[in-house]
Amino acid sequence: MAVNRRPDRVAEAIRAETASFLASGVKDPRVMGLVTVTGVDVARDLRSARIFVSILGSDVERAATMEGLASAASHLRSRLGKSLRLRSAPEVAFKLDESIARAARIHAVLEEANRSDAAIAEQRAAAAGDSPEPGDAADDG
């Protein structure tokens, strides 16, 4: 059975074009902060595309940016149709991707756990250095 890779190629082209659009073409003042395109899912029939974005900023800024992106979706669709030369441009929907924020939180928790483990190890080493182990006195003679 042949594997159809065209949706993957179109998804990558949409990701690149959307990143370019966000870097230079968005005029909506609600789109603020750092917006990163993390991925694109395209339907097999190429009629719809879900664009996953990560937005750096507060919850209020994220909500405003998502509203701005939703209003700019039709302009992006037109731009995609022209640049990708598809028979019909896919319907575009933006979805918030929180995987980067989740990964940052996990990283922070792991760092804190590592610091805590190091502090406990230092305390144990200091306590062991102050009082001899029970078998240490028997080993001397």
Image: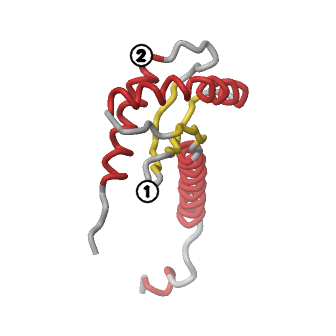
Q: Residue furthest front?
A: 87
Q: In which quarter of the image is the N terminus?
A: bottom left
Task: Answer left or right for 62 relative to 50.
Answer: right
The structure residue drawn at horizontal position 46% and vertical position 26%, both measured from the top left corner, is 78
Mark 2 or 1, closer to the camera:
1
Please say if 57 is above or below 42.
above
The structure residue drawn at horizontal position 45% and vertical position 16%, both measured from the top left corner, is 25
Where does label 1 land, which residue?
A: 44
The structure residue drawn at horizontal position 58% and vertical position 63%, both measured from the top left corner, is 124
Q: Residue furthest left?
A: 2
Question: Which residue occupies the foreground of this view, 20 or 100?
Answer: 20
Coordinates of residue 31 in the picture (x, y in percent): 59, 20
Coordinates of residue 34 in the picture (x, y in percent): 51, 25
The structure residue drawn at horizontal position 43% and vertical position 56%, both measured from the top left corner, is 44
Question: Which residue occupies the foreground of this view, 24 or 8?
Answer: 8
Q: In which quarter of the image is the C terminus?
A: bottom left
**Could you tell me how far apart the alpha carbons at marks 2 and 1 are, in whole angstroms?**
29 Å
Where does label 2 land, which residue?
A: 24
Name the secondary structure under disc 2: helix
Name the secondary structure under disc 1: loop
Q: Which residue lies furthest to the right in this view?
A: 60
Coordinates of residue 48 in the picture (x, y in percent): 51, 45
